[in-house]
Image (cartoon, helix red, strand yellow):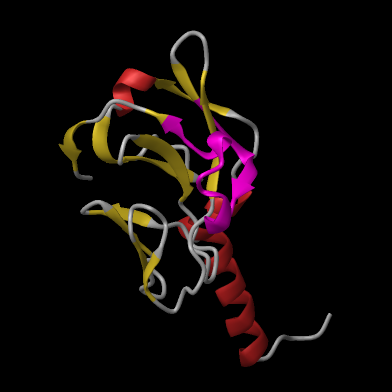
Amino acid sequence: MGEIDRRQFVAGLAACACAACPGLSALAETTDPVDVGPLEEFKTAGVHDPRTGSFFLVNRGGRLYAVSSICTHKQVKLVAREGAFKCPRHGSTFAADGNVTKSPARKALPRYAIRVEQNGHVVVDPSRAFTKAAWDDPAAFVAVDTAPDKRT
């Protein structure tokens, strides 16, 4: 085996750093349905982080929906701040409804299928995504009574 030059070393080091980046690990999240708990836990208006890694729950306007937590620009894990979402890598921001409020992202965040089981638990199905044009699809939200605003 030959020696590697400086450029190859730096490229390999960068690849290792990217592989270890927590923002990219979200891409490997499951697409299986996720039971996030009782609906009662999400009755407060605002953004809820069920710590799944792949979505946030938002209670807004009498609807509870699951919005992707992955930036549409470069697929980096978003962070929830003051009722909105921000990409820590390139600075894109999204409103709680998923619409882009600051580029470089250009596409709204998808929402995932959501339902309430007979036991009262909310189940999110990340394998069924809804683009902005389909956000009013009955499978893209559940109706909820809203309590006062909760900010994360």
Classify residue 152 as left or right of residue 18: left
Does the magenta portion include 41?
Answer: no
Vertical relation: 41 (above or below) 95: above
Classify residue 32 as left or right of residue 14: right
The quadrant of the picture occupied by the N terminus is bottom right
Vertical relation: 21 (above or below) 138: below
Q: Identify the residue at image location x=56%, y=57%.
A: 133
- Point out residue 96 in the picture as x, y percentages from the top left corner: 33, 53
Vertical relation: 35 (above or below) 23: above
Q: Identify the residue at image location x=57%, y=75%.
A: 13
- Point out residue 135 in the picture as x, y percentages from the top left corner: 51, 48
Q: Identify the residue at image location x=28%, y=27%.
A: 43
Which residue lies most toward the left here? 148
Classify residue 106 as left or right of residue 125: left
Q: Quadrant of residue 19?
A: bottom right
Q: Quadrant of residue 14?
A: bottom right
The quadrant of the picture occupied by the C terminus is top left
- Point out residue 106 in the picture as x, y percentages from the top left corner: 49, 74
Vertical relation: 115 (above or below) 69: above
- Point out residue 131 in the picture as x, y percentages from the top left corner: 57, 55
Does the magenta portion include 136?
Answer: yes
Q: Identify the residue at image location x=51%, y=45%.
A: 136
**Start-end of magenta stretch:** 123-142
Q: How many marks?
A: 0
